[in-house]
C-alpha cells in the first residue's frame, strides 16, 4: 500500500487523498509546449513541477506503474505564421523548436522519455505530437456530431455548448461572464457565442488533412481537440490526473472536458486537475505577449540548470513566483553548501520520511526543502534531494557544467593564465593585472595558491 498522497483538485476546489483508478498504471496528462519559438522560464515551471509529480508517483507506485503523457502542440496559427516569416517549412520549425525545448528541459534536471522508458513496459513517458493524432481527432469530432454535441457550419465543426447542461464545471465561471468573453470574436457560423471550433478549413499554404464527414474541403483541428485525442489514445477515456498552468483552466481545459465527456458519455475526463501558478516579473505574468520574458536558454547561460530548478521548487506550485536574481543567488549558495556536505556519498536506500511527508501534502516542496536543510547525514541528504531531482551530479561533473553554462572557452583561459604566469615571472605587474582583468571580464577569477600554483574558477 503506497503512503497517502493528498492533492488539491481544481475540479472540486478541495485537497483530497489521491486514489488512482488502477494503481498498477497511474495515468497523468500534462499540456506541453506549442513549438514555434524558444520556451521562456515561465513555461519551465509546469515542466519542472509536473516532473516532480512524476518522480513522486514513480516513488509511490513503482516506476513500472506510472504513465505520463506530456504533449507537443505542433499545429497552431502561431506556428504557421512563424514558419512563413522565417521561410522554412512547418515541420522544420517544429522539429527545430522541439529539439531546443528538449535541450532546455534536460538541463533543468527534468526526466526524459529515454531516461525512464523500458522496452516492452506498459507504463511509459510519452510525448505525443498533435499532428500524429489527426485520425483520433476526426474520430472524436465525428462522434460528437453523431451524439448531437457538435454541428457543421461553413466547413467548420463547432462544439454546441448549450447541448451540455453542466458545461463550465471546471472553471465555474458564470455563464454571462463566459459569454461576454466569447462575444469578442463572434463568428457568423456559431449558433451560440460560447460554441468553440473543433475543426476549421485550411487557407492556402496552411497544413491540412482530410476533414470529418460532411466537409469536402481539407482542414485542420482546433487547439482543444488535440488534448482530448492524445489523452484518449494514450491514457483512455477517463484517467487520473490532468495538469497544466492556471491560465489553461478556461477555455482550454474546460473545452477538453466538454469534448471528452460528451463524446464518451463519461462523468469526468480526469479525476484530479492540477494547475500551477504563474511565474511573474515584478508582479506580472511572464509571457511572450507582454514581452517581459527571458528564455530558458538565456537563464542557462548564466546559471546551472540545477540552480534554476531549486529556485523554482522553493515556492509551492500553486503560488505565484516572483523571478528574481536574489532567488537564483540563494539557490546557488544552497547547492554549493549541499554539494560540499554530500561529497561523493551514495544515496541512502530509504527515503527520509521528513522529506517525503511534505511532498505527500500537495507537493509542498518549500517544506520538503526546509527539511533537507536539517539533514546532516550525507547519504540521507542525497536520497531526499534525489526525490526532488537535485544533487544528482558528481563534483567534477558540476565544475564542468558551470564552465559550459558560462560559455567559457577553457583553451583561451589556460592560454591567458600562462601569459599571466610569464608576466609575473618577468615581474611585469602591469601586464599581469591586465590579463587578470581580461579573465575577470570573461567571468573567470584566478587564485594564486601558497604552493605556487594558480587555479581558476567561474565567477557566480
Ligand atoms: P504556452 O506556450 O503559452 O501555451 O504555455 C505552455 C505552458 O506554460 C502552459 O502550461 C502554460 O500554462 C504555462 N505557462 C505559460 N506562462 C507561464 C508563466 N508565466 N508561469 C507559469 N506557467 C506558465
Ligand atoms: Zn491541453
Image (spheres, helix red, strand yellow):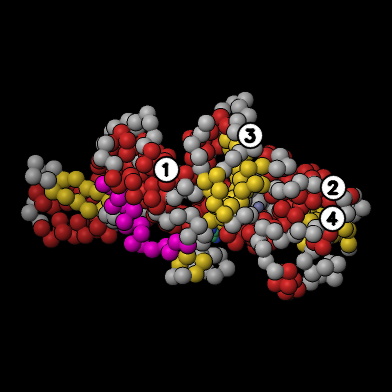
Of mark 1 and mark 4, the one earlier in the sequence is 4
Tag on residue 22? 3
Report, in whole angstroms, how far the alpha carbon at label 1 lies from the one at label 3.
23 Å
The residue singled out by tag 1 in the image is 357
Residue under the image location 13 percent in, 48 percent down: 448
Percent coordinates x, y for residue 226 in the rendering: 71, 50
> Quick one: SS at disc 2?
helix
In front: label 1 or label 4: 1
Q: For the residue labelled by badge 4, is the local secondary structure a helix, a strand or a loop?
A: loop
In the figure, 126 relative to 433: above or below?
Answer: above
Q: Mark number for residue 143?
A: 2
Q: Give the mark nearest the N terminus, 1 or 3.
A: 3
Give the CA distance from mark 1 to mark 4. 44 Å
Which contiguous range is marked in magenta?
320-337
Local packing at callout 3 (Cα closer than 10 Å; few below 14, some 14-19, many 20+) is: few
Residue drawn where x is 34% and y is 32% of the image: 347
Camera-nearest label, 3 or 4:
3
Residue 92 position in % (x across, y down): 64, 49
Q: Is residue 396 visible?
A: no
* For marks 4 and 2 on the same chain, the one whose residue lies earlier in the sequence: 2
In this view, the residue farthest toward the top is 120
First in sequence, mark 3 or 4: give its number.
3
Question: How many labels sit on residues?
Answer: 4
- Residue closer to the observer: 191 or 208: 191
Tag 1, which secondary structure?
helix
- Nearer mark to the viewer, of 2 and 3: 3
Q: Which residue is mark 4?
A: 149
Nearer the observer: mark 2 or 1; the answer is 1
Amino acid at each position: 500500500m503506497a503512503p497517502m498522497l493528498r492533492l488539491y483538485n481544481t475540479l472540486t476546489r478541495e485537497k483530497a487523498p489521491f486514489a488512482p483508478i488502477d494503481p498498477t498504471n497511474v495515468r497523468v496528462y500534462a499540456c506541453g509546449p506549442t513549438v514555434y519559438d524558444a520556451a521562456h522560464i515561465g513555461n519551465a515551471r509546469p515542466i519542472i513541477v509536473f516532473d516532480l509529480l512524476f518522480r513522486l508517483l514513480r516513488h509511490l507506485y513503482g516506476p513500472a506503474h506510472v504513465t505520463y503523457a506530456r504533449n507537443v502542440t505542433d499545429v497552431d496559427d502561431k506556428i504557421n505564421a512563424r514558419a512563413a516569416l522565417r521561410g522554412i517549412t512547418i515541420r522544420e520549425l517544429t522539429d527545430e523548436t522541439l529539439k531546443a525545448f528538449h535541450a532546455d528541459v534536460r538541463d533543468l534536471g527534468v526526466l526524459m522519455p529515454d531516461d525512464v522508458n523500458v522496452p516492452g513496459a506498459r507504463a511509459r513517458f510519452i510525448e505525443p505530437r498533435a499532428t500524429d493524432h489527426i485520425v483520433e481527432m476526426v474520430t472524436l469530432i465525428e462522434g460528437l456530431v453523431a451524439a448531437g454535441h457538435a454541428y457543421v457550419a461553413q466547413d467548420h465543426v463547432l462544439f454546441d455548448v448549450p447541448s451540455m447542461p453542466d458545461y463550465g464545471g471546471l472553471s465555474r465561471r458564470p455563464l454571462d461572464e463566459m459569454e461576454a468573453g466569447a462575444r469578442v470574436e463572434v463568428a457568423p457560423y456559431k449558433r451560440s457565442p460560447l460554441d468553440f471550433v473543433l475543426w476549421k478549413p485550411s487557407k492556402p499554404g496552411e497544413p491540412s488533412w482530410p476533414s470529418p464527414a460532411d466537409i469536402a474541403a481539407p482542414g485542420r483541428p482546433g487547439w482543444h481537440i488535440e488534448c482530448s485525442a492524445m489523452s484518449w489514445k494514450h491514457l483512455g477515456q477517463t484517467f487520473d490526473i490532468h495538469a497544466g498552468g492556471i491560465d489553461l483552466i478556461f477555455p482550454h481545459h474546460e473545452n477538453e472536458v466538454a469534448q471528452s465527456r460528451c463524446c464518451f458519455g463519461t462523468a469526468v475526463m480526469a479525476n484530479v486537475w492540477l494547475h500551477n501558478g504563474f511565474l511573474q516579473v515584478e508582479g506580472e505574468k511572464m509571457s511572450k505577449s507582454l514581452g517581459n520574458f527571458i528564455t530558458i536558454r538565456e537563464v542557462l547561460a548564466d546559471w546551472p540548470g540545477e540552480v534554476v530548478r531549486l529556485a523554482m521548487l522553493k515556492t509551492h506550485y500553486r503560488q505565484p513566483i516572483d523571478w528574481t536574481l536574489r532567488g537564483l543567488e540563494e539557490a546557488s549558495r544552497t547547492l554549493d553548501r549541499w554539494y560540499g556536505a554530500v561529497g561523493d556519498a551514495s544515496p541512502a536506500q530509504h527515503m527520509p520520511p521528513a522529506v517525503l511527508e511534505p511532498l505527500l501534502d500537495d507537493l509542498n516542496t518549500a517544506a520538503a526543502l526546509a527539511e533537507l536543510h536539517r539533514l546532516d547525514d550525507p547519504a540521507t541528504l542525497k536520497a531526499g534531494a534525489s526525490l526532488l531531482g537535485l544533487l544528482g551530479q558528481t563534483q567534477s561533473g558540476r565544475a564542468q557544467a558551470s564552465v559550459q553554462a558560462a560559455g567559457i572557452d577553457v583553451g583561451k583561459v589556460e592560454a591567458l593564465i600562462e601569459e599571466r604566469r610569464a608576466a609575473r615571472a618577468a615581474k611585469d605587474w602591469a601586464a599581469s593585472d591586465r590579463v587578470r582583468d581580461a579573465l575577470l571580464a570573461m567571468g573567470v577569477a584566478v587564485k594564486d595558491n601558497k604552493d605556487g600554483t594558480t587555479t581558476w574558477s567561474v565567477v557566480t
